[in-house]
């Protein structure tokens, strides 16, 4: 469905580029949910915006790599260009449902606008399709809510509207950039359930971006762990939680409250995530790694294949959850 | 919607009442006495007392205010001392020119300011944007009389396309007489269009950073549609309130332009009336301008309500 190869997103001049995403590769199969997890500032949002063709201009740009959507190269295309080229089957929902809808336009208009572009219909049929979509995302009184304005709806409802707008694009791939971070926990569970359900019913692939390992465990089929602009570990969700191979992944899991019930103090990964471009040689995680070796500071770590679909960017990966 | 309109109208009436008190009080605080202006230096104390009594100026000030306000409510603003004619007629004569001039100016301001501001915002950071913003800055900075004189020099004196001064009423000469207002309205529009241009540009650049604009782009609609349906629509919320202020200010700020083009407008009338100590006219014009400001603000508020569905809740 979606294949990203060696994606590098940079800021700064061409002469001295600073990579905020470097050499990111991943694939998402049909109907699969890939969780992209990492701390704030690790490049996950930039990765998702680059894949969507929505990098802010002027600003970061794709310096290298390739994005293929259902077999077509869409690397440099913005959404409208993708639609014109017939590859508009990708959509995105965002972190802030409160500000992601236009405050002065009716919900129905905002959905019908996407329907018009992707289905080529307008007027009453587009409006009918908008109502259908609202029902699909389980908005009660769909017909009534079509003529509501965003400020009349709650955060959870607005995120459902955002999902409806995304579905209006008839996506085969949906990018969800921390769609539940701004919502209450109960609403969060409902939205996650809805996404899982839609993924199954529409056979849609999802790139789900989050910093919450709990959400990953609940939702994802496969996981890519991102750190310092790189994907440091990729695995099926079961394998990752059962046997993390990268020291950073292990650190993230140790921080989960659910794994530390009764503890007086949660473990943390000491230090801070590096600023983009701060580390130029060796492994980006080396300064914070508990098992760091001299080699790690000099050599770029290899991408080791450690099982079916399980890869880690580490010269000394964990064995059975322990350092060698 | 209607209860909102009524509430705003009620608030406007209260403001109008407060303004009328202030206008009245100020006129009476200003040094000088209309009696001396009317009768001159040679008047006897007897004549002065008689006229003071005739004009009701020997009454307590509160009673004078009530009389004036009562007449004003019935549409009678008194008698002009200089023209020896009802103030309402004196103002009405000037109002035709002023309202037509302000309206034409506003048309230029909207037609020039908004589209060019939009182009500058869409192309922001390019030479086109910098060029347009530079030109706007120039017109916002130069004095209106300079622009006016150059327009006269080019279009009236050299090319002879348009008249350079005066304005015969359209009620006498037909709509063709509007050509007399073409140069004055362009003159008056220059600084205002420049401000609206810069405001439109700045407001659009602000809105362009909003999350919902990203959502719109993510839908795959064309860039121009994103600008028109999402950015411009929201950016205009800021610009519309500026329209109101600009229009109302045009009535009183037109003095220089009216002088350059020798137009019989309200701006010039008020300045001349001050020089003639024609108090009833000054009072009347200020009151009319206040009413105009209130009306336009009311219209802007209502327009806001139509443009922004969130307003009703506030």
Image (cartoon, rainbow, N blue to C red):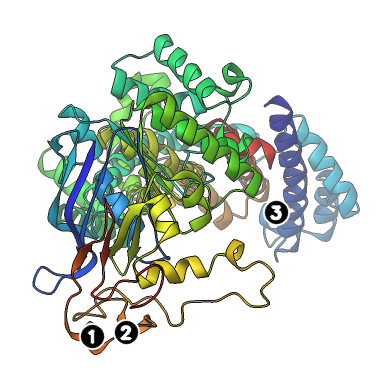
Residue A167 appears in the figure: yes
Side of A113 relative to B307 (left or right): left
Say which residue label 2 marks.
Answer: A292
Q: State yes or no: discs 1 and 2 in contact (Cβ < 8 Å).
A: yes
Q: Find residue A49 and report its horizontal and vertical position in percent.
A: 30, 50
Q: Find residue B59 and report its horizontal and vertical position in percent.
A: 90, 51
Are labels 1 and 3 on one chain?
A: no
Assess disc 2: are there few (<14), some (14-19) or many (≥20) residues with their C-alpha within 10 Å of its C-alpha.
Answer: some
Say which residue label 3 marks.
Answer: B39
Q: Secondary structure at mark 3?
A: helix
Q: For marks 1 and 2, give the CA distance.
A: 8 Å
Say which residue label 1 marks.
Answer: A297
Chain on which label 1 sits: A
Q: For marks 3 and 2, give the CA distance.
A: 103 Å
| Whether residue B38 is situated above or below residue A274 in the rendered picture | above
Q: Secondary structure at mark 1?
A: helix
In front: label 1 or label 2: 2
Quarter where residue B230 is shown: top left
User: Looking at the image, which is closer to me, B300 or A47?
Assistant: A47
For the point 58% across and 55% down, the residue is: B274
User: Looking at the image, which is closer to me, B188 or B52?
Assistant: B188
């Amino acid at each position: 469905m979606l294949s990203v190869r060696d994606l590098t997103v940079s800021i700064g001049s061409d002469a001295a580029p600073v990579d905020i995403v470097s050499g990111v590769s991943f694939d998402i199969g049909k109907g699969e949910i890939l969780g992209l997890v990492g701390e704030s500032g690790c490049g996950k949002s930039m990765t998702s915006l680059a894949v969507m063709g929505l990098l802010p201009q002027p600003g970061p740009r794709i310096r290298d790599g390739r994005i293929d959507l259902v077999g077509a190269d869409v690397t440099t295309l913005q959404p409208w260009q993708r639609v014109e080229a017939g590859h508009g089957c990708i959509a995105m929902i965002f972190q802030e449902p409160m500000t992601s809808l236009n405050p002065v336009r009716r919900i129905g208009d905002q959905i019908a606008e996407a329907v018009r572009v992707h289905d080529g219909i307008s007027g009453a049929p587009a409006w009918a399709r908008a109502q259908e979509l609202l029902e699909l995302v389980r908005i009660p009184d769909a017909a009534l809510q079509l003529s509501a304005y965003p400020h009349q709806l709650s955060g959870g409802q607005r995120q459902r509207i955002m999902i409806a707008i995304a579905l209006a694009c008839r996506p085969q791939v949906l990018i969800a950039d921390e769609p539940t971070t701004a919502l209450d926990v109960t609403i969060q569970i409902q939205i996650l359930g809805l996404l899982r359900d839609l993924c199954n019913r529409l056979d849609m692939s999802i790139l789900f971006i989050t910093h919450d390992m709990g959400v990953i465990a609940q939702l994802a089929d496969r996981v890519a762990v991102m750190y310092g602009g790189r994907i440091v570990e990729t695995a099926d969700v079961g394998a990752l939680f059962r046997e993390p191979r990268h020291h950073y992944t292990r650190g993230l899991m140790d921080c989960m409250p659910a794994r530390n019930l009764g503890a007086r103090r949660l473990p943390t990964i000491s230090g801070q995530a590096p600023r983009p471009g701060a580390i130029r040689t060796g492994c980006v995680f080396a300064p914070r790694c508990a098992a760091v070796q001299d080699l790690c500071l000099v050599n770029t770590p290899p991408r080791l294949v450690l099982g079916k679909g399980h890869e880690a960017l580490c010269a000394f990966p964990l064995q059975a959850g322990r350092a060698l | 919607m209607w209860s909102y309109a009524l509430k705003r109208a009620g608030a406007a009436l209260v403001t109008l009442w407060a303004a009328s008190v202030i206008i009245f009080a100020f006129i009476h605080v200003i040094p000088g006495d209309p009696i001396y202006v009317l009768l001159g230096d040679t008047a006897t104390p007897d004549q002065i007392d008689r006229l003071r009594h005739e004009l009701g100026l020997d009454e307590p000030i509160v009673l004078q205010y009530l009389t004036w306000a009562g007449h004003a409510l019935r549409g009678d603003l008194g008698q002009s001392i200089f023209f020896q004619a009802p103030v309402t007629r004196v103002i009405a004569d000037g109002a035709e020119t002023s309202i037509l001039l302000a309206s034409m100016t506003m048309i230029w301001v909207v037609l020039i300011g908004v589209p060019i501001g939009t182009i500058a915002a869409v192309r922001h950071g390019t030479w086109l944007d910098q060029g347009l913003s530079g030109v706007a800055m120039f017109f916002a900075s130069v004095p209106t009389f300079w622009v006016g004189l150059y327009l006269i020099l080019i279009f009236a004196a050299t090319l002879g396309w348009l008249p350079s001064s005066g304005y015969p009423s359209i009620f006498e000469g037909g709509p063709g007489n509007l050509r007399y207002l073409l140069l004055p309205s362009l003159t008056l529009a220059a600084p205002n269009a420049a401000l609206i241009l810069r405001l439109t540009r700045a407001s659009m650049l602000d809105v362009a950073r909003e999350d919902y604009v990203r959502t719109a782009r993510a839908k795959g609609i064309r860039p121009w549609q994103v600008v028109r349906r999402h950015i411009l629509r929201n950016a205009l919320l800021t610009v519309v309130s500026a329209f109101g202020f600009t229009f109302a200010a045009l009535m009183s700020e037109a003095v220089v332009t009216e002088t350059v083009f020798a137009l019989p407008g309200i701006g010039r009338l008020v300045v001349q009336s001050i020089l003639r100590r024609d108090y009833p006219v000054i009072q009347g014009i200020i009151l009319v301008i206040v009413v105009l400001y209130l009306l336009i603000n009311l219209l802007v508020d209502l327009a806001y309500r139509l443009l922004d569905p969130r307003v009703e809740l506030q």
